[in-house]
Structure formats: C-alpha cells, structure tokens
C-alpha cells in the first residue's frame, strides 16, 4: 500500500495549478476582458477552418481503404503555415481522437464516428452513400475539434493536419502507454472507491447530462420508427404508382393523363425517399453523435471524481500515519491482535523495544513528510482538474445550444423544402386532370 502511493507520478499532468494552461495560453483574442472558453469558441470559429473532401478508394479486397483530403486554413500563429493540405484515412482520425484524449484528459473531446456499422456487415462500406456519410461525420468531428479553444492548438492536431507519417508518433504513444501500465495498481486500488465529499455542481451536471442523453435516446428511437414508417409509405406509394400506370394502359381514353399522374406519384415517392435519407443522415445522425457526446462528458466527470478519490485516499493514508505516529510516541500500540503478536515476537527475538520504537518513529516521520507533499500535490491536481472540467462543462452547454439551434433549423428547412416541392408537383398535375375529356359513345 505504501509503495503504491509513494510511486504516484504527478510530473506528466498537462495542466497547471492555479491558472491552467487552457485558460492562459489558448485565446488569441486581445481585450481588456479575458474571454471565457465559451465566448472564444462561439465568437472565433473562423480562426481554424478544416474541410474534409475528395474521398478516394485505395486497394482492393480486405486491404482496401478510403482516404480523405484534409485542407486547413488558419490565422493562428501557432501553426507553421496559414494553409495546409494532406490526405488521411479513418485510422488516422482514430489516432487523433485517442491522442487528444491522452494529451488533454480534462477536455470533453468530441466523439469520433464509429467504425463498425451495419454497412460493413453487408459489405457496403465502399458505397458512395456510406462514404459520403462517413465524410460528413468526419467533417462534423473536425469542426467541433477546431472550435475548441484548447484542442485547436494541440500539437497532435497540428501533426494530423500537416503532411507526414503518423506511425512515428504512434510508436511514441505506445511507449507512453507502457509507462502508464506501471501505475496500474493505483487504478485497481481506487477503481471501486467513491467520492466521500462530492461536489454538488458536478453531481447536478451529471444528472442533467444523463437526463439529456435519455431524452435524446427517446427522440432518436421515435424518429427511427418514423423513418421505418416512411419506408413503408415509400413502398406503398411506389406500388400505387405501378397500379395507376397499369390502369392507364387498360383505360385507353385516359392513358395520357393517367400516365402523367403516375409520373407525379413517382416524383412524390422520390421526394419522400430523399427526405428520409436526409433526415437519417442529418437529424438522426446528429442525435446519435450527441448521445456519444454525452458519453464523453460522463467519462470526463468520472475522471474528475477519480482525481478527487486519489486525493481523499492519500489524505486518509496520511491521517492514519499521523495517528500511528502519535500512538508510537505515547508508547501505545494499536490495541489489536496484530500489535500484540508483534510485541510477543519482538520479545522472543530479544529486540530492544525503545530502539524499535525510535526506528519506527523515524520511518513514520519520513512517510508523513512524503505523504504530506503527495497530499498537497494531489489536492492541487484535483482542484486544477475540477476547475478545468467546470470550464469544459460551461463550453459544452453553450456549444450544445448553438448546435441544436442549427440541427432543428436544418430539420425544419428540410421539412419545408419537402412539402413545397410536393406542392409544386401536385399543382402541376391539376391542369392535366382538369383537361380530361371523356368521349361520348357513338349513337347507334
């Protein structure tokens, strides 16, 4: 137990106590009032523009993959050039996402679109539709990363956006991972510990995020159900168009109008299909991405709790050591069976009790001094981490509002576009139907 806490390494923390790096080095805005993370993200979105275009397939069979052109324009002076271009495949995006999480553990890193989807199972991962969905998702991901005031200045993001092989960086990342495994015992010991004095603001935010995620999941399920109904309606409409066309063939007097009416129904069917596909990609896709975003928020909150648990566990260990020193100085043992057996064992070995007591006091003094320093460091780390997470939560809230404003506006516009186009299609067929003239049967 003692070695575990004493082996804790606090030197690799990517933020400082007091004023954190995120708040002191990420804002290029110069004004008398220091901008918050929120105002920076919402008002300086043009500082870094990244576009994902031109998907290209490489290879065949199981070794095939798709690369995307990643073009960057920036006014940030931390970048080597104002314009950069490179090509990246999905695995490179995975590397970027993992590296951002490792470099900035207190940041809410936007979710990366999942790699394993149903299209892969059906062998359709190279279809134009799937590739376009993937491109749009990757574009959204980089948009969110680029507007984050901390992540946009990340060294790994600069590496990703510039030309060059990421394999060298990947090897260095594996070396860091081996160092992390050295402290796996810390994680194991504290994995089941709970925060003794939870912070109310983080408890409330976690509850709000969970409710938000639950509501999003409900909306996503309901709209997925609607899309299935739209698919059924699309099939029925297509069948209806076929029946009308067949009827036109049989009724020779109105073949032309019925054929045009059938074409109208086919156009409506096409509009319905386009509407459903757009809703699935834009609206339902956005909901699923934000559900994943909620998972990222909860992971950061969980890590914040872990930092507090680390501090509380160290504090408890220090208090126990101080109590042990006081008992030893007073000549009292712990009073338990273990202390009794140890005393009898020392008597059996003819050990001088006073010398043993002084030696134990010396060890306890050294342990307490080391623990005191570790407690102070863990307190600073926990406080700095909590402060950074609080800023991240504020940013997430504001960005979420802005995102859903765009999501709901786009959804509304797509509905209006669908019904306006449908109205024009139906209006065009009205004159054709009104001009139908039935020939009177010839008199005998």
Image: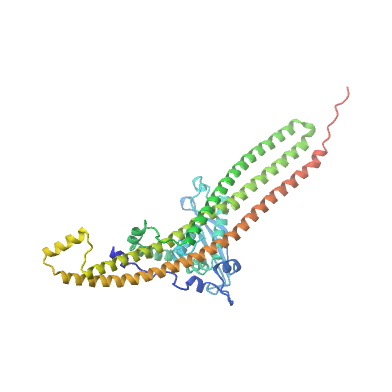
Residue depicted at x 63% and y 54%: 408
Please determine whether, in this image, residue 144 is positioned above or below residue 361: above
Please determine whether, in this image, residue 278 is positioned above or below residue 304: above
Of residues 197 and 121, which is closer to you in this image? Answer: 197
Q: Name the spot of residue 113 as percent of width and height, x first.
A: 52, 55
Of residues 353 and 22, which is closer to you in this image? Answer: 353
Residue depicted at x 62% and y 39%: 232
Q: Quadrant of the C terminus?
A: top right
* 314 horizontally vs 17: left or right: left
* 320 horizontally vs 85: left or right: left
Q: Name the spot of residue 415 as percent of width and height, x first.
A: 67, 50
Color encoding of the figure: rainbow
Q: Name the spot of residue 418 as percent of width and height, x first.
A: 69, 49
Dividing the picture into quarters, in which one does residue 360 lie?
Answer: bottom left
Dividing the picture into quarters, in which one does residue 38 lie?
Answer: bottom right
Of residues 272 and 91, which is closer to you in this image? Answer: 272
Which residue is situated farthest in the top direction here? Answer: 444
Please count the marks in the image. 0
Q: Name the spot of residue 80 as percent of width and height, x first.
A: 52, 73
Q: Is residue 126 visible?
A: no
Q: Quadrant of the N terminus?
A: bottom left
Which residue is situated farthest in the bottom direction here? Answer: 32
* 331 horizontally vs 95: left or right: left
Q: Is residue 406 visible?
A: yes
């Amino acid at each position: 137990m003692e070695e575990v806490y004493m082996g804790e390494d606090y030197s690799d923390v990517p933020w400082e106590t007091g004023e954190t790096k995120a708040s002191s080095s990420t804002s290029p805005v110069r004004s008398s009032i220091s901008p918050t993370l929120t105002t920076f993200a919402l008002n300086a979105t043009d500082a870094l523009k990244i576009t994902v275009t031109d998907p290209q397939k490489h290879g065949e069979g199981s070794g095939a993959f798709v690369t995307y052109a990643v073009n960057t324009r920036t006014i940030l002076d931390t970048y080597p050039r104002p314009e950069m271009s490179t090509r990246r495949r999905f695995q490179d995006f995975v590397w970027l996402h993992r590296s951002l999480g490792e470099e900035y553990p207190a940041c809410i890193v936007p979710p990366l679109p999942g790699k394993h989807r149903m299209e892969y199972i059906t062998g359709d991962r190279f279809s134009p539709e799937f590739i376009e969905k993937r491109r749009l998702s990757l574009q959204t991901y980089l948009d969110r990363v680029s507007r984050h005031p901390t992540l946009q200045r990340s060294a790994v993001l600069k590496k990703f956006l510039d030309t060059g092989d990421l394999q060298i960086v990947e090897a260095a990342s594996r070396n860091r991972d081996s160092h992390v495994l050295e402290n796996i015992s810390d994680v194991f010991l504290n994995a089941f510990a709970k925060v003794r004095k939870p912070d109310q603001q983080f408890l409330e935010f976690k509850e709000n995020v969970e409710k938000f995620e639950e509501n999003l999941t409900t909306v996503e399920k309901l709209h997925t159900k609607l899309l299935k109904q739209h698919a059924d309606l699309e099939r029925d409409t297509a069948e209806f168009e076929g029946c009308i066309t067949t009827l036109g063939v049989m009724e020779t007097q109105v073949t032309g109008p019925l054929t045009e009416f059938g074409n109208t129904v086919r156009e409506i069917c096409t509009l319905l299909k386009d509407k459903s596909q757009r809703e699935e990609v834009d609206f339902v896709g956005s909901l699923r991405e934000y559900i994943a975003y909620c998972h990222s928020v909860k992971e950061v909150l969980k890590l914040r709790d872990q930092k507090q648990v680390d501090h509380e566990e160290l504090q408890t260990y220090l208090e126990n050591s101080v109590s042990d020193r006081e008992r030893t100085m007073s000549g009292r043992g712990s009073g338990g069976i273990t202390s009794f057996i140890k005393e009898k064992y020392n008597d059996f070995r003819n050990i001088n009790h006073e010398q043993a007591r002084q030696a134990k006091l010396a060890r306890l003094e050294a342990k307490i001094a080391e623990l005191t320093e570790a407690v102070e460091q863990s307190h600073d780390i926990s406080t700095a981490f909590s402060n950074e997470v609080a800023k991240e939560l504020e940013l997430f809230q504001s960005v979420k509002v802005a995102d859903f404003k765009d999501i709901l506006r786009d959804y509304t516009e797509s509905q209006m576009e669908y019904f306006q186009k449908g109205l024009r299609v139906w209006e065009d067929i009205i004159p054709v139907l009104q001009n139908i003239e039935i020939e009177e049967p010839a008199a005998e």
